[in-house]
Image: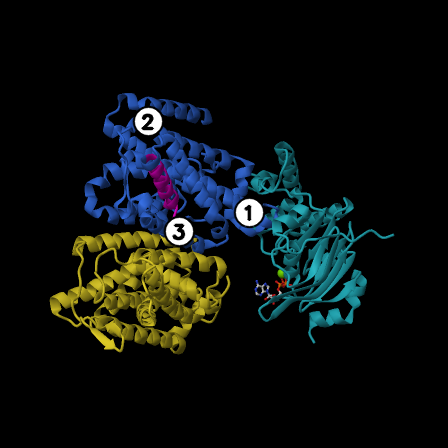
Amino acid sequence: MKRAFQVGLAVLLFGLALYPTMASGYGIRFMLQLFMWVALAQSWNLISGLTGYVSFGHVAFFGTGAYAAGILVTTHGWHWVPASLAGGVAAVILALLIGYPCLRLKGPYFAISMLGLNEVMRVLVSYFEGLTGGGSGLSFPTQPASVQIYYAMALSALAVTGAAYFIITSRFGLKFMTIREDEVAAEAMGIDTARYKLGAFVLSAFVPGVVGGLFARDTGYIEPISVFALIITITMIVMALFGGKGTVWGPVLGAVTLFVLQELVWARFLFFYQILFGAIIVVVVLLMPRGILGVLQQRYHLPRTI
Amino acid sequence: MNVVITPAMVGQVVISGLLAGALYSLVALGLALIFGVMRVINIAHGTILMLGAYTTFWSFHILGLNPYLSLLVSMPLMFLLGVLLQRTFVRRVVDAPELSSLLLTFGISIALVNMAQLAFTSDLRSVEFLTGAFLLGPFAFSKSRVISFAFAVTLSLFAFWFLQRTKLGKAIRATSQSREVAMVCGINVQRIHLYSFGIASALSAAGGSLVAVMVAIQPEMGQVYTFKSFLVIVLGGAGNYPGALLGGMLLGLVEQLSSLFLTTQVSEAVAYLLLVLVLLLRPTGLLGGRST
Amino acid sequence: MQTRPILEVSGVTKRFGGVTAVNRCSLSLARGKIYGLIGPNGSGKTTLFNCITGLERRDEGEVRFKGGRIDGLKPHQVARRGIGRTFQIIRVFPELTALENLLVVTQGPFEAARRRAEELLRFVTLDRLQNEYAGNLSYGQQKLLEFVRVLMTDPELILLDEPAAGVNPTLLNELLAAITGLRDQGKTILIVEHDMKVVMGLSETIFVLDYGEKIAEGPPGVIQADARVIEAYFGR
Ligand SMILES: Nc1ncnc2c1ncn2[C@@H]1O[C@H](COP(=O)(O)OP(=O)(O)OP(=O)(O)O)[C@@H](O)[C@H]1O
Ligand SMILES: [Mg+2]
């Protein structure tokens, strides 16, 4: 069983690596966006699925990365690859700055403080017009590079899923989960919860920053309301939740399912899009809060690592 | 800086702050009620405000109803919507982790906003009712703001009286102190939840009807009010209802004062910054709420 | 010359608003002994535990462990110095398996930790449930799991908050034997327990709290006869 899974995974990765050689432009852009959502949902999973600290403003890291990379590319002439990595670093710096104070907050207070952070970031970016172009946004003058971005997005998704795998399957990762399970007991058992929380938070910020940079380069244009949009946070949360938060493959499964559904089905109903999305959220929250994998796991006693 | 700030300007700003603050208090009191009683942050709170504003708009536009009289329509209507939402959805997440209630109410919110877009289009609407201003020495205050202020204060005080003095109000406060104790005392907690959500929605709708004469009405206008209301209850201390009233005034003041020195955009960020700062420095609220 | 006490609590006070939960309490524990801490409900036993382990910050007084001040340290720092505790209200990690509950608190070589965890689970007869989520175990089983979880970190001082409540009689005897066994290995143990037979049987010295104050201290026989203790328990 495990063997078959590994082989299947290897074949899949191989296929995805070759995909751009035979795909249409649309196909490539479809896939790179899919990878982006996998990376985002999985990143959210690292902080919220594992430690239970619900980040309701995770898009702040995405937007910060997008703008950091955007500024480096447009005004400093950086290549988009190092610029996107720098976007990740910028997100990590932001996470370090706000993580220490905000992670002391509990429950809904942490969630809302993150929401507030995202709003502050959006306003700040709009305000410093000289640097960011303000409300009118930032345009990239360069040529499209979908294939390269395809691989970069794929690597990002792979990296964060790999990190999730490593964390969730290790004793080290269990320590993150004790925070979600019972923070007081974890402290009393000698686990430095403040450090682990901050660690998970920083880890969960890096890839969204990188992916934000890649997204900016791919779309060629960013503006504050598009890269600091609350709906992006919600989408990553719902994807992770739908597949099963706190598991390795749940966020991947959730991101793939919902993204494909979204592109193939709802995109045709643009007018009702939010009604449908709202309905999906309600259904997921009420009927399957543990997600697909969470349910399977409980029913069949599967390990967390599937 | 070549802008001179005169005492008259400060006076004007302080009073404008209080005028705006009373509305925040009114709306936030609703959110505080839901949070206090169920520990749920209702992201759809501002959405209900938006629906209240549309109720006023349409009853003014079609029936020619006085916007202030339309409170008599919007409040009961949203009370019913609130009760319905609580009965069908929110009830199920009252004891779930905060993620569930945040997401659920967010889902309800975007669905309602989308419905409003379909039904009313995204055009900006306004109720041209009271224009002009009261002049008072060096100060000028738009009539609609002053009257809305009066309504907001009256309604808030009424709600407050209701919580303090009536049997239902006392039961609501008992439930927000401790659900277990309330249950032991024979209070039907499910019913209290239902009423609280209904009353909270009616308060939010009242806020919507009152802002309808002042600001542009559009389907996405509500979100800001959800956030501001949350800020207000953080300022006042969770579960502290008088705190919500004072918190609203405080927010109005801070916003207006900061708009003296900063652009409006940034003064909005100031509100959020305030939120984060207060959460960090005084997690139980400026006026002290109950600890968890 | 007598060796220095392993734990010295001197003049610790903790207030919650108007309630003084612990009032100028002083205790001194010598290494390698079992102590009991008793008192009516609400007399401040759990709060005193919390002040020792850093979960609550004491308002006054000091706590020394092996001679060093530990009041003011964070709970995990206290734990790292060698104080382990269990909770009155069970605090296992419900969505980790029984085995994971034990592994997660360890450091150092993994294999050794796993062997130790399996051994301890066998000891409390939970070995067949090692891959079950802790949240699915019965109350008594969770209690036992929490007890062995403390042992995983090999603390020198162990604070047990009502370890016997809800554990079935046959297992209880083994549990008590285990506690004496720990003492024989040189550990120091402080037990809060309402079951008088259990505390009186185990402890060499008993402290009695009433309204946050220590009203008596001594061997079980003396305590049982102490007028103030009887008054505290049977009303005044
Ligand atoms: N976090 C808190 N906030 C306010 N009061 C508290 C808090 N924790 C404890 N108290 C109060 O402190 C007093 C002592 O409580 P504590 O739990 O320490 O008693 P206890 O001796 O462990 O009782 P029991 O035998 O019932 O477990 C009680 O009056 C309790 O109400
Ligand atoms: Mg106790």
Residue A256 shows in this picture: no
Q: Please, what is the three-letter code of the amino acid marked with disc 3?
A: Leu
User: Are labels 1 and 3 on one chain?
Assistant: yes
SS at badge 2: helix
Q: Please, what is the three-letter code of the amino acid marked with disc 1?
A: Thr
SS at badge 3: helix
- Is A257 situated left or right of B96 in this image? left
Q: Which residue is mark 1?
A: A193
Give x and y (percent) for residue C65: 72, 52
Identify by letter the chain in blue. Answer: A
Chain letter of mark 3 equals A
Classified by dominant secondary structure, the portion drawn in magenta counts as helix
User: Are labels 1 and 2 on one chain?
Assistant: yes
Residue toward you, B88 or B24:
B24
Query: Is A72 colored magenta in this rendering?
Result: yes
Query: Is A304 colored magenta in this rendering?
Result: no
Residue toward you, B31 or A81:
A81
Whether pointer 1 and pointer 3 mark residues with C-beta atoms closer than 8 Å, the reply is no
How packed mark 1 is, by other alpha carbons closer than 10 Å (few <14, some 14-19, many 20 or more), is: many
- Identify which residue is drawn at 33% across, 51% down: A123
N-terminal-most mark, 2 or 3 = 3
Answer above or below: position of A70 versus B122.
above
User: Magenta region: which residues?
Assistant: A56-73
Residue toward you, C177 or A213:
A213
Identify by letter the chain in yellow. Answer: B
Q: Which residue is mark 3?
A: A117
